[in-house]
Each structure stands twice: as C-alpha cells, then as structure tokens.
Image (spheres, helix red, strand yellow):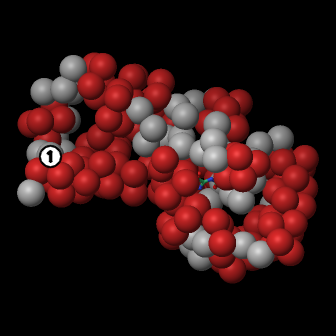
C-alpha cells in the first residue's frame, strides 16, 4: 500500500485499518486523520508520536492502561486483540510453563500495584528472558521515569504495527 492509497482512505477506512496501532486507542488514528495528506509512513508515525507526547501524565497512563498484561488473563481467556496475541506469541508468552506463568502474574501484579498501570514492553523486540528481567528491573524505577519508559515502548509497538499493516497489504496484493 503506498501513501497515496493511505491518503485516499475515508475516515472510517483509515480508523478501521490503523485503529489498533496503539492498543485499543482508536481515538489516536481518528485524531491524526486530520493531518492528511501524509508524506509517508514516517510522517504518520510522527503525528502519532506528537499526539501521544502532547498528552498529560494521566492521558499517557490512560494509554498504558489500555494494554493487556503479558501472559495475563486476556491471553488465558482468549480475549487479546489479534495484534497482541501475535506479539505475545512471538515473545514466547504463549509457551510459558506453570512456574513462569505464576512468576509473570506475581511481577505484573506488583508492578500494577506500584505504578497504577500495567507493565508495557514491546514484545516483538524482546524474548521471554528479556521480558522477565526488564519487568523485575523496572519495578525499581520511580513512577515518572517508568511512565515515560513505558510510553516509549508503546511507540515501538506502534511503529512495528504500522509497518506490519503496510507489509501485509502488499503481500495480499501479490
Ligand atoms: C504488549 C502487547 O499487547 N504487545 C506488546 O508488544 N506488548 N503488552 C504489554 N503489556 O506490554
């Protein structure tokens, strides 16, 4: 899909296609649609980053709260979004043994209790061991630092999702 095709999408089509580039936050694609025409994918990404950076601390925490826990209840009950399921699968979160699941639940709960939002990390850029290590390490941060770190992870997840949409669209046309 080239940028002319993206710019030709109606608002409804655009939100349908890009609505989950930030997990369960279609308001972000709804907002940045106003910035058409986009120059390229990097331009779309820049508008998303600008939108997120313009939010208050509570707005940023709201975005974080839209994310499911890694290896959490949504994974077990099959209620993850397609994107999150694929990402968690790639990071090995769907193949944990029972001790690892218990450890993830304990650390995720501790994290949520300490910061008031879930632990977020770009699963596609980390394996199981990285995720568990970073979760333990990041529990030591203060809330402001952790909020900013987690939001940077949201941007990485978003970037990979954006590129995936464009790539899968090309593949279906070939
Ligand atoms: C996620 C998710 O759903 N995908 C990803 O890369 N990370 N969730 C999370 N809590 O980090």
Judged from the image, the secondary structure of the residue bearing numbered disc 1 is loop
Q: Position of residue 169 (x, y in %)?
A: 21, 49
Tell me: residue 152, above or below residue 102. Answer: above
Comparing 113 with 72, the one in front is 72
Image quarter for ligand 1: bottom right
Residue 134 placement: quadrant = bottom right
Q: Which residue is mark 1?
A: 1
Asked whether residue 69 appears in the rendered view, the answer is no
Which residue is rendered at x = 27% and y = 25% of the image?
Answer: 13
Which residue is rendered at x = 16% and y = 30% of the image?
Answer: 7
Which residue is rendered at x = 39% and y = 51% of the image?
Answer: 161
Asked whether residue 1 appears in the rendered view, the answer is yes
Instruction: Count the numbered circles shown.
Output: 1
Judged left or right of residue 70, residue 137 is: right
Judged left or right of residue 170, residue 86 is: right
Q: Position of residue 105 (x, y in %)?
A: 84, 59
Residue 15 placement: quadrant = top left
Q: Position of residue 102 (x, y in %)?
A: 87, 66
Tell me: residue 173, above or below residue 32. Answer: below
Which residue is rendered at x = 49% and y = 58% of the image?
Answer: 86
């Amino acid at each position: 899909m080239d940028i002319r095709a993206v710019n030709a999408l109606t608002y409804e089509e655009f939100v349908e296609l890009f609505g989950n580039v930030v997990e369960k936050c279609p308001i972000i694609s709804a907002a940045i649609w106003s910035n058409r025409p986009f120059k390229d994918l990097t331009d779309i990404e820049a508008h998303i980053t600008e939108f997120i950076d313009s939010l208050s601390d509570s707005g940023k925490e709201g975005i974080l709260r839209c994310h499911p826990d890694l290896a959490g209840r949504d994974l077990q009950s099959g209620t993850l979004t397609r994107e999150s399921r694929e990402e968690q699968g790639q990071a090995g979160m769907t193949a944990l043994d029972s001790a690892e699941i218990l450890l993830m639940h304990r650390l995720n709960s501790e994290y949520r209790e300490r910061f008031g939002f879930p632990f977020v990390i770009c699963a596609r850029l980390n394996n199981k061991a990285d995720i568990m290590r970073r979760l333990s390490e990041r529990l030591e941060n203060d809330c402001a630092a952790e909020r900013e770190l987690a939001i940077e992870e949201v941007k990485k997840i978003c970037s990979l999702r954006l590129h995936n949409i464009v790539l899968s669209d090309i593949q279906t046309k070939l």
